[in-house]
Image: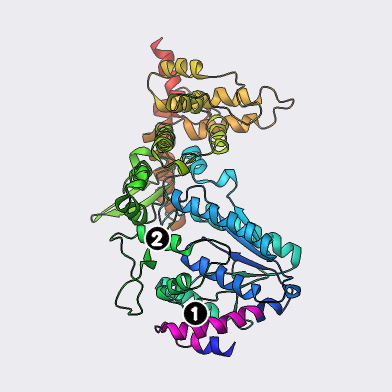
Amino acid sequence: MTTAQQAENKGQQTRTVAELVDYIQALNIEIQELYCLDEIPWVLGVSWGKDSSTVLQLVWNAIAALPPEKRTKTVYVITTDTLVENPVVSAWVRKSMQNLKVAAKKQGMPIDPHLLQPVIEDTFWVNLIGKGYPAPRNQFRWCTPRLKINPANQFIREIVRANGETILVLGTRKAESVKRAATMKKHQVDRVRDRLSPNASLPNSLIYTPIEDWSNNDVWIYLNQWDNPWGQSNKELFAMYRGATADNECPLVVDTSTPSCGDSRFGCWVCTLVNKDKSMEAMIQNDEEKEWMQPLLDIRNELDIQDDRDKRDFRRIWGDVQLFERNKDGKHSVEPIPGPYIKYWREYWLRQLLEAQTKTRLTAPESMRDITLITLEEMSEIRRIWLEDKHEFDDSLPRIYQEVTGEEFQDPRPGADYSLLGRDEWIVLEEICEGDAMHLELMAKLLDTERQYRKKTRRVGIYETLEKCFNTSSRSPEDAIKNARLKRELSEAVSQGDVAKVKQMTLGDVAAINEVDEGKSESDEEVTWASMKFKNKDSEE
């Protein structure tokens, strides 16, 4: 290990090819010693980009050089398919996993590959189209844990439960970013064994990062000079990175003044956490055969708008108005935090996605014609959310699916097509509500709540559920926001001990209620938009 550790102390200094060869030989011994030191299983996380591919190849070659009787410890190779990966990269990943599985079995290697996926409830489209979550932002980065972290962590926890502990092998490098370098340096201080750092998020697991001090050029030189042991072509990977670089150039030189193509980054094609999807833009620009991905890029760019307030509810996803202080262009205001996408826009994104899927299946190369942008299981869960959680009993998903694809939607969920209420009843309700969105929402929730409880032997909880319908949907947007501001002001007055203001506000509310609704007894409920709506209807008659 000493040679590898001495090289490590050089930090990010550029290595000559001869130095890199010596370092790899020392690293090979280090990996073998760590592998044979104990019975703790390894979990090697790969994205099949250049860094993780390098680590996997290093580990494979080191273990392959051991006698067969020493290859007793399983190395679990895990890859997470977020279901919204760049399609070209996704195809590469699946091909790589299959090649790895076949080669491991043929060569007697203790490599066990696993392709992980998020649970249906956590997928990107179920959250965005189904629940209405807005496109991810740094302030609301809901996608990363659900799509990437949770599936991997769940697998690692299962390995820990079965074996007591595990060692997680990763391809992270300090050269990736300043933040990454600082994090890795911090973890180095707490190392419990040579080269092994504690995992802050997963107990009983240690982290091993064999190429933490490699540069981009080190990685590419290794991948291009050392043969891939499971039959994959590293030159294909190199070409993929090259195609994802804006100038279509990927120089490999020792001179650090010349940039490597290693700065290209692949990820989810829907990612709105970056300003642009430069890799997909470059692929489309550099290769006519990849122009079929343009509809995907269009959807991503349409999702990535600075202000989407007009597309979102004035309430949070649980139905309450929540306020925040805003300071824009020197103007201070207290405004509601925008909530989920409203019904129209959720249906719009579904239609756009299905249209893109239909178009790409016609224009993509033969090998990509079976592309799936949204799965049947995801659409089934979206449909369930719209029907059962959002009470949108017009059941628009099958209709949109048939209009776009020309095919009938086959829902795999048992009993999904049975309903007492449907589009005809929804149209009648829209006519009755005369374009009043809040009135329509309240009536739909009340009717569908009764439908959901009608077959239950004990209708326990129905009154609480009906009450929630009124609490979240019985006021107009203007009244609901005004009420939230009054509550905020009252809460601030209470916290400041301003008794006079508290009395003024509470007495003012009572006076307003009496003025609006004279003749009501003290036991009557709070005056709401719904009660006033029906009272006005009665007076008109």
- Residue beneath the point at 46% across and 86% down: 19
From this view, report whether residue 449 is shown above or below residue 193: above
Residue 150 visible? The answer is no
The answer to which image quadrant residue 16 occupies is bottom left
Residue type at numbered disc 2: Ala
Query: Could you tell me residue 56's position as x and y percent?
Result: 57, 68
Secondary structure mostly seen in magenta is helix
Q: Is residue 508 above or below residue 236?
A: above
| Secondary element at tag 1 | helix
Find the magenta span and give its range: 7-32
Identify residue for label 1. 185
Where in the figure is residue 449, as x and y percent of width and height? Answer: 59, 26
Name the quarter where the C terminus is drawn: top left
Q: Residue at x 59, y 80 (%)?
A: 28
Quadrant housing residue 261 = bottom left
Q: Secondary structure at mark 2?
A: helix
Three-letter code for the amino acid on which mark 1 is drawn: Lys
- Identify the mark at residue 239; answer none if there is no mark: 2
Residue 13 belongs to magenta span: yes
For the N terminus, which image quadrant? bottom right
- 162 left or right of 278? right
Estimate the spatial distance between the alpha carbons at disc 1 and disc 2, rounded to whole Å. Answer: 32 Å
Q: Callout 1 environment at 10 Å: few (<14), some (14 to 19), or many (20+)?
A: few
Q: How is the image coloured?
A: rainbow
